[in-house]
Image (cartoon, rainbow, N blue to C red):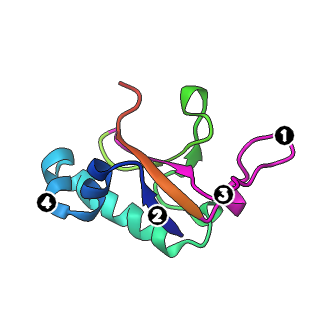
């Protein structure tokens, strides 16, 4: 899949191991690297298996999360234009091939 980033700060966390370890800790930075490799290797979101992949609800409706470590999550949104949708209007994750990483953290806080 193609991976985009919401902003420069998130891109740096994802691309620079030292920055990720400083902010997230070694274990979480390692998981982040694994999840990014899985995203790159997958053709579409529905192929993801590691990290408890799941669509989000509420104020994060339309986004998808992968677990990292210690309650932290990697959250992304579809970046296909137009966004693939199901007949009910929800995101058709089986057709999403471009994602934008929106958030890395614990959204439950």
Say what secondary structure mark 3 lies in. loop
Residue at left offset 41%, top offset 48%: 6
User: Considering the numbered disc 4 on the image, is that residue within a helix, a strand or a loop?
Assistant: helix
Q: For mark 3, what is the residue?
A: 81
> Does the residue at mark 1 contact the one at mark 3 (Cβ under 8 Å)?
no
The residue to which callout 1 is attached is 88
The residues tagged by marks 4 and 1 sit, at their Cα atoms, a distance apart of: 43 Å
Determine which quarter of the picture holds residue 95: bottom right
The residue under the point 59% across, 26% down is: 58
- Counting residues from the N terminus, which is met first, the one under dot 3 or under dot 4? 4
Q: Name the side, left or right, on which 50 lies relative to 103.
A: right
Q: Which mark is residue 18?
A: 4
Q: Secondary structure at mark 1?
A: loop
Task: Point out the tag, 4 or 2, that comes first from the N-terminus.
Answer: 2
Report the residue marked by disc 2. Answer: 3
User: N-terminal of the two: label 2 or label 1?
Assistant: 2
Disc with the residue nearer the chain's start (2 vs 3) = 2
How many neighbours does mark 4 have within 10 angstroms: few (below 14), some (14-19), or many (20 or more)?
some
Q: Is residue 106 left or right of residue 17?
A: right
Inter-mark Cα distance, 2 to 1: 26 Å
Q: Earlier in the sequence, mark 1 or mark 3?
A: 3
> Marks 3 and 4, Cα distance to the nearest angstrom?
33 Å
């Amino acid at each position: 899949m193609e991976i985009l980033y919401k902003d420069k700060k998130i891109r740096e966390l994802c691309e620079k191991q030292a920055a990720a370890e400083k902010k997230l800790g070694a274990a979480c930075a390692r998981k982040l690297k694994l999840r990014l490799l899985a995203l790159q290797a997958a053709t579409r979101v529905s192929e993801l298996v590691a990290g408890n992949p799941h669509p989000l609800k509420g104020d994060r409706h339309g986004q998808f999360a992968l677990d990292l470590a210690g309650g932290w999550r990697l959250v992304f949104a579809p970046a296909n234009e137009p966004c693939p949708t199901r007949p009910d209007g929800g995101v058709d994750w089986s057709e999403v091939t471009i994602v934008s990483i929106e958030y890395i953290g614990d959204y439950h806080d």
